[in-house]
Image (cartoon, rainbow, N blue to C red):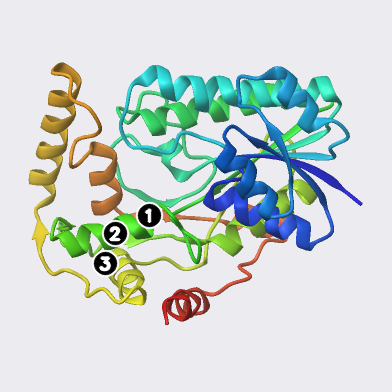
Amino acid sequence: MSRAFVTGGSGFVGGRLIERLVGDSWSVAALARSDRAVEAVGKRGAEPVRGDLSDPPALASGLQGADVCFHVAAKVEDFGPWPAFVEVNVEGTRNVLRACRTAGVRRAVHVSTEAVLMHGQPLIGADERYPLAFRSPAPYSRSKALAEQVALEESRDGLEVMIVRPRFVWGRGDTTLLPLLVEGTRSGAFRWVGGGRQLTSTTHIDNTVEGLLLAAEHGRGGRAYFVTDGAPVVFRDFVGELMSTQGVTPPTGSVPTPVARALAAAGETAWKLLPLSGAPPLTRFASWVASQECTLDDHRARVELGYAPVTLREEGMRELRDAVA
């Protein structure tokens, strides 16, 4: 039996990864920083290890005897103080990978994102050769780009680190993106930016997990891999269908892209200078995601990992509708 250590196991991606590993007869330990996380990972069949990314003894305990480490945990927000992003996304990644080497774990999979390339521009047919956005004004993008740099630096001396980049992860069990879309629509706050007719790649949660497992088995250390659902779709059509699966009628209102960008920049400036609690109603990162093409080429994963989507979009949408019925 293979053994895995998972960070971020109480979240959407990490939770489904644990379920898949346990279903495939893996022994799984999972880092859990709260009582809620302990309960969540335990229910999915993992052995909870109480601690966080800054806790070397907890990391060492969880990694004991592991064949593979899946580093899923991250600060996934589009606004906030820079030091908090560095602490979790950059230094947390460094801590996990160095603990892997100390524990003798030979393979690690770092979960990343297409956001590592974003600094305000569209991505059209981008592949893994596209440069990382180390100077992005969005703290999530910049910190995850730096985390990838750490992953590449740590892929040495007997530790192979593979990077997997899903895009727009969706599906049953999503507790973040889909609820926000539904809430925004029901409250009347949601608007399409620039009409929402741009193309986007997507990655169903099952396909995300499939990519992670294939990277652990077949990936080459120091390599990044995009994994997607296949051909891109129109953003508005896809998001509208997601909303419809929850019994919500997609909105029709739209705001011009230049107006949205100006509002986002002004809001971020105000929140930083005053300062105000929480996040502005619209951030630069959110305006990019909502208005710009983001199409990705996953050819490398298909060739080197043998990746292919295991769940089609229509199957994922049907599953979401059935969960509400």
Which amino acid lies under the numbered mark 1 shown in the image of this protein? Leu
Q: In the image, 293: left or right of 301? A: left
* Residue at 52% over, 79% down: 315
Q: Are marks 3 and 1 in contact (CB under 8 Å)?
A: no
* 169 and 183: which is toward the camera: 183
Q: How far is disc 3 from disc 1 in space, using C-alphas? A: 15 Å
* Residue at 51% over, 48% down: 127
Quadrant in which the C terminus appears: bottom left
Q: Position of residue 318 (x, y in %)?
A: 47, 80
Mark 3 or mark 1, earlier in chain: 1
Q: Which mark is residue 177?
A: 1
**How many numbered badges does the structure rendering display?**
3
SS under mark 1: helix
Give the residue at mark 2. 181
Q: Position of residue 87 (x, y in %)?
A: 49, 20
SS under mark 2: helix
Mark 3 or mark 2, earlier in chain: 2
Which amino acid lies under the numbered mark 3 shown in the image of this protein? Arg
Give the residue at mark 3. 236
Among the 4 quarters of the image, the one containing residue 103? top right
**Residue 156 in sight in this render:** no
Q: Residues within 10 Å of mark 2 (few under 14, many from 20)?
A: some
Among the 4 quarters of the image, the one containing residue 307? bottom right
Name the residue at the right extreme: 1
Q: Nearer the viewer, mark 3 or mark 1?
A: 1
129 in relation to 64, above or below: below
69 in relation to 59, above or below: below
209 in relation to 247, above or below: above
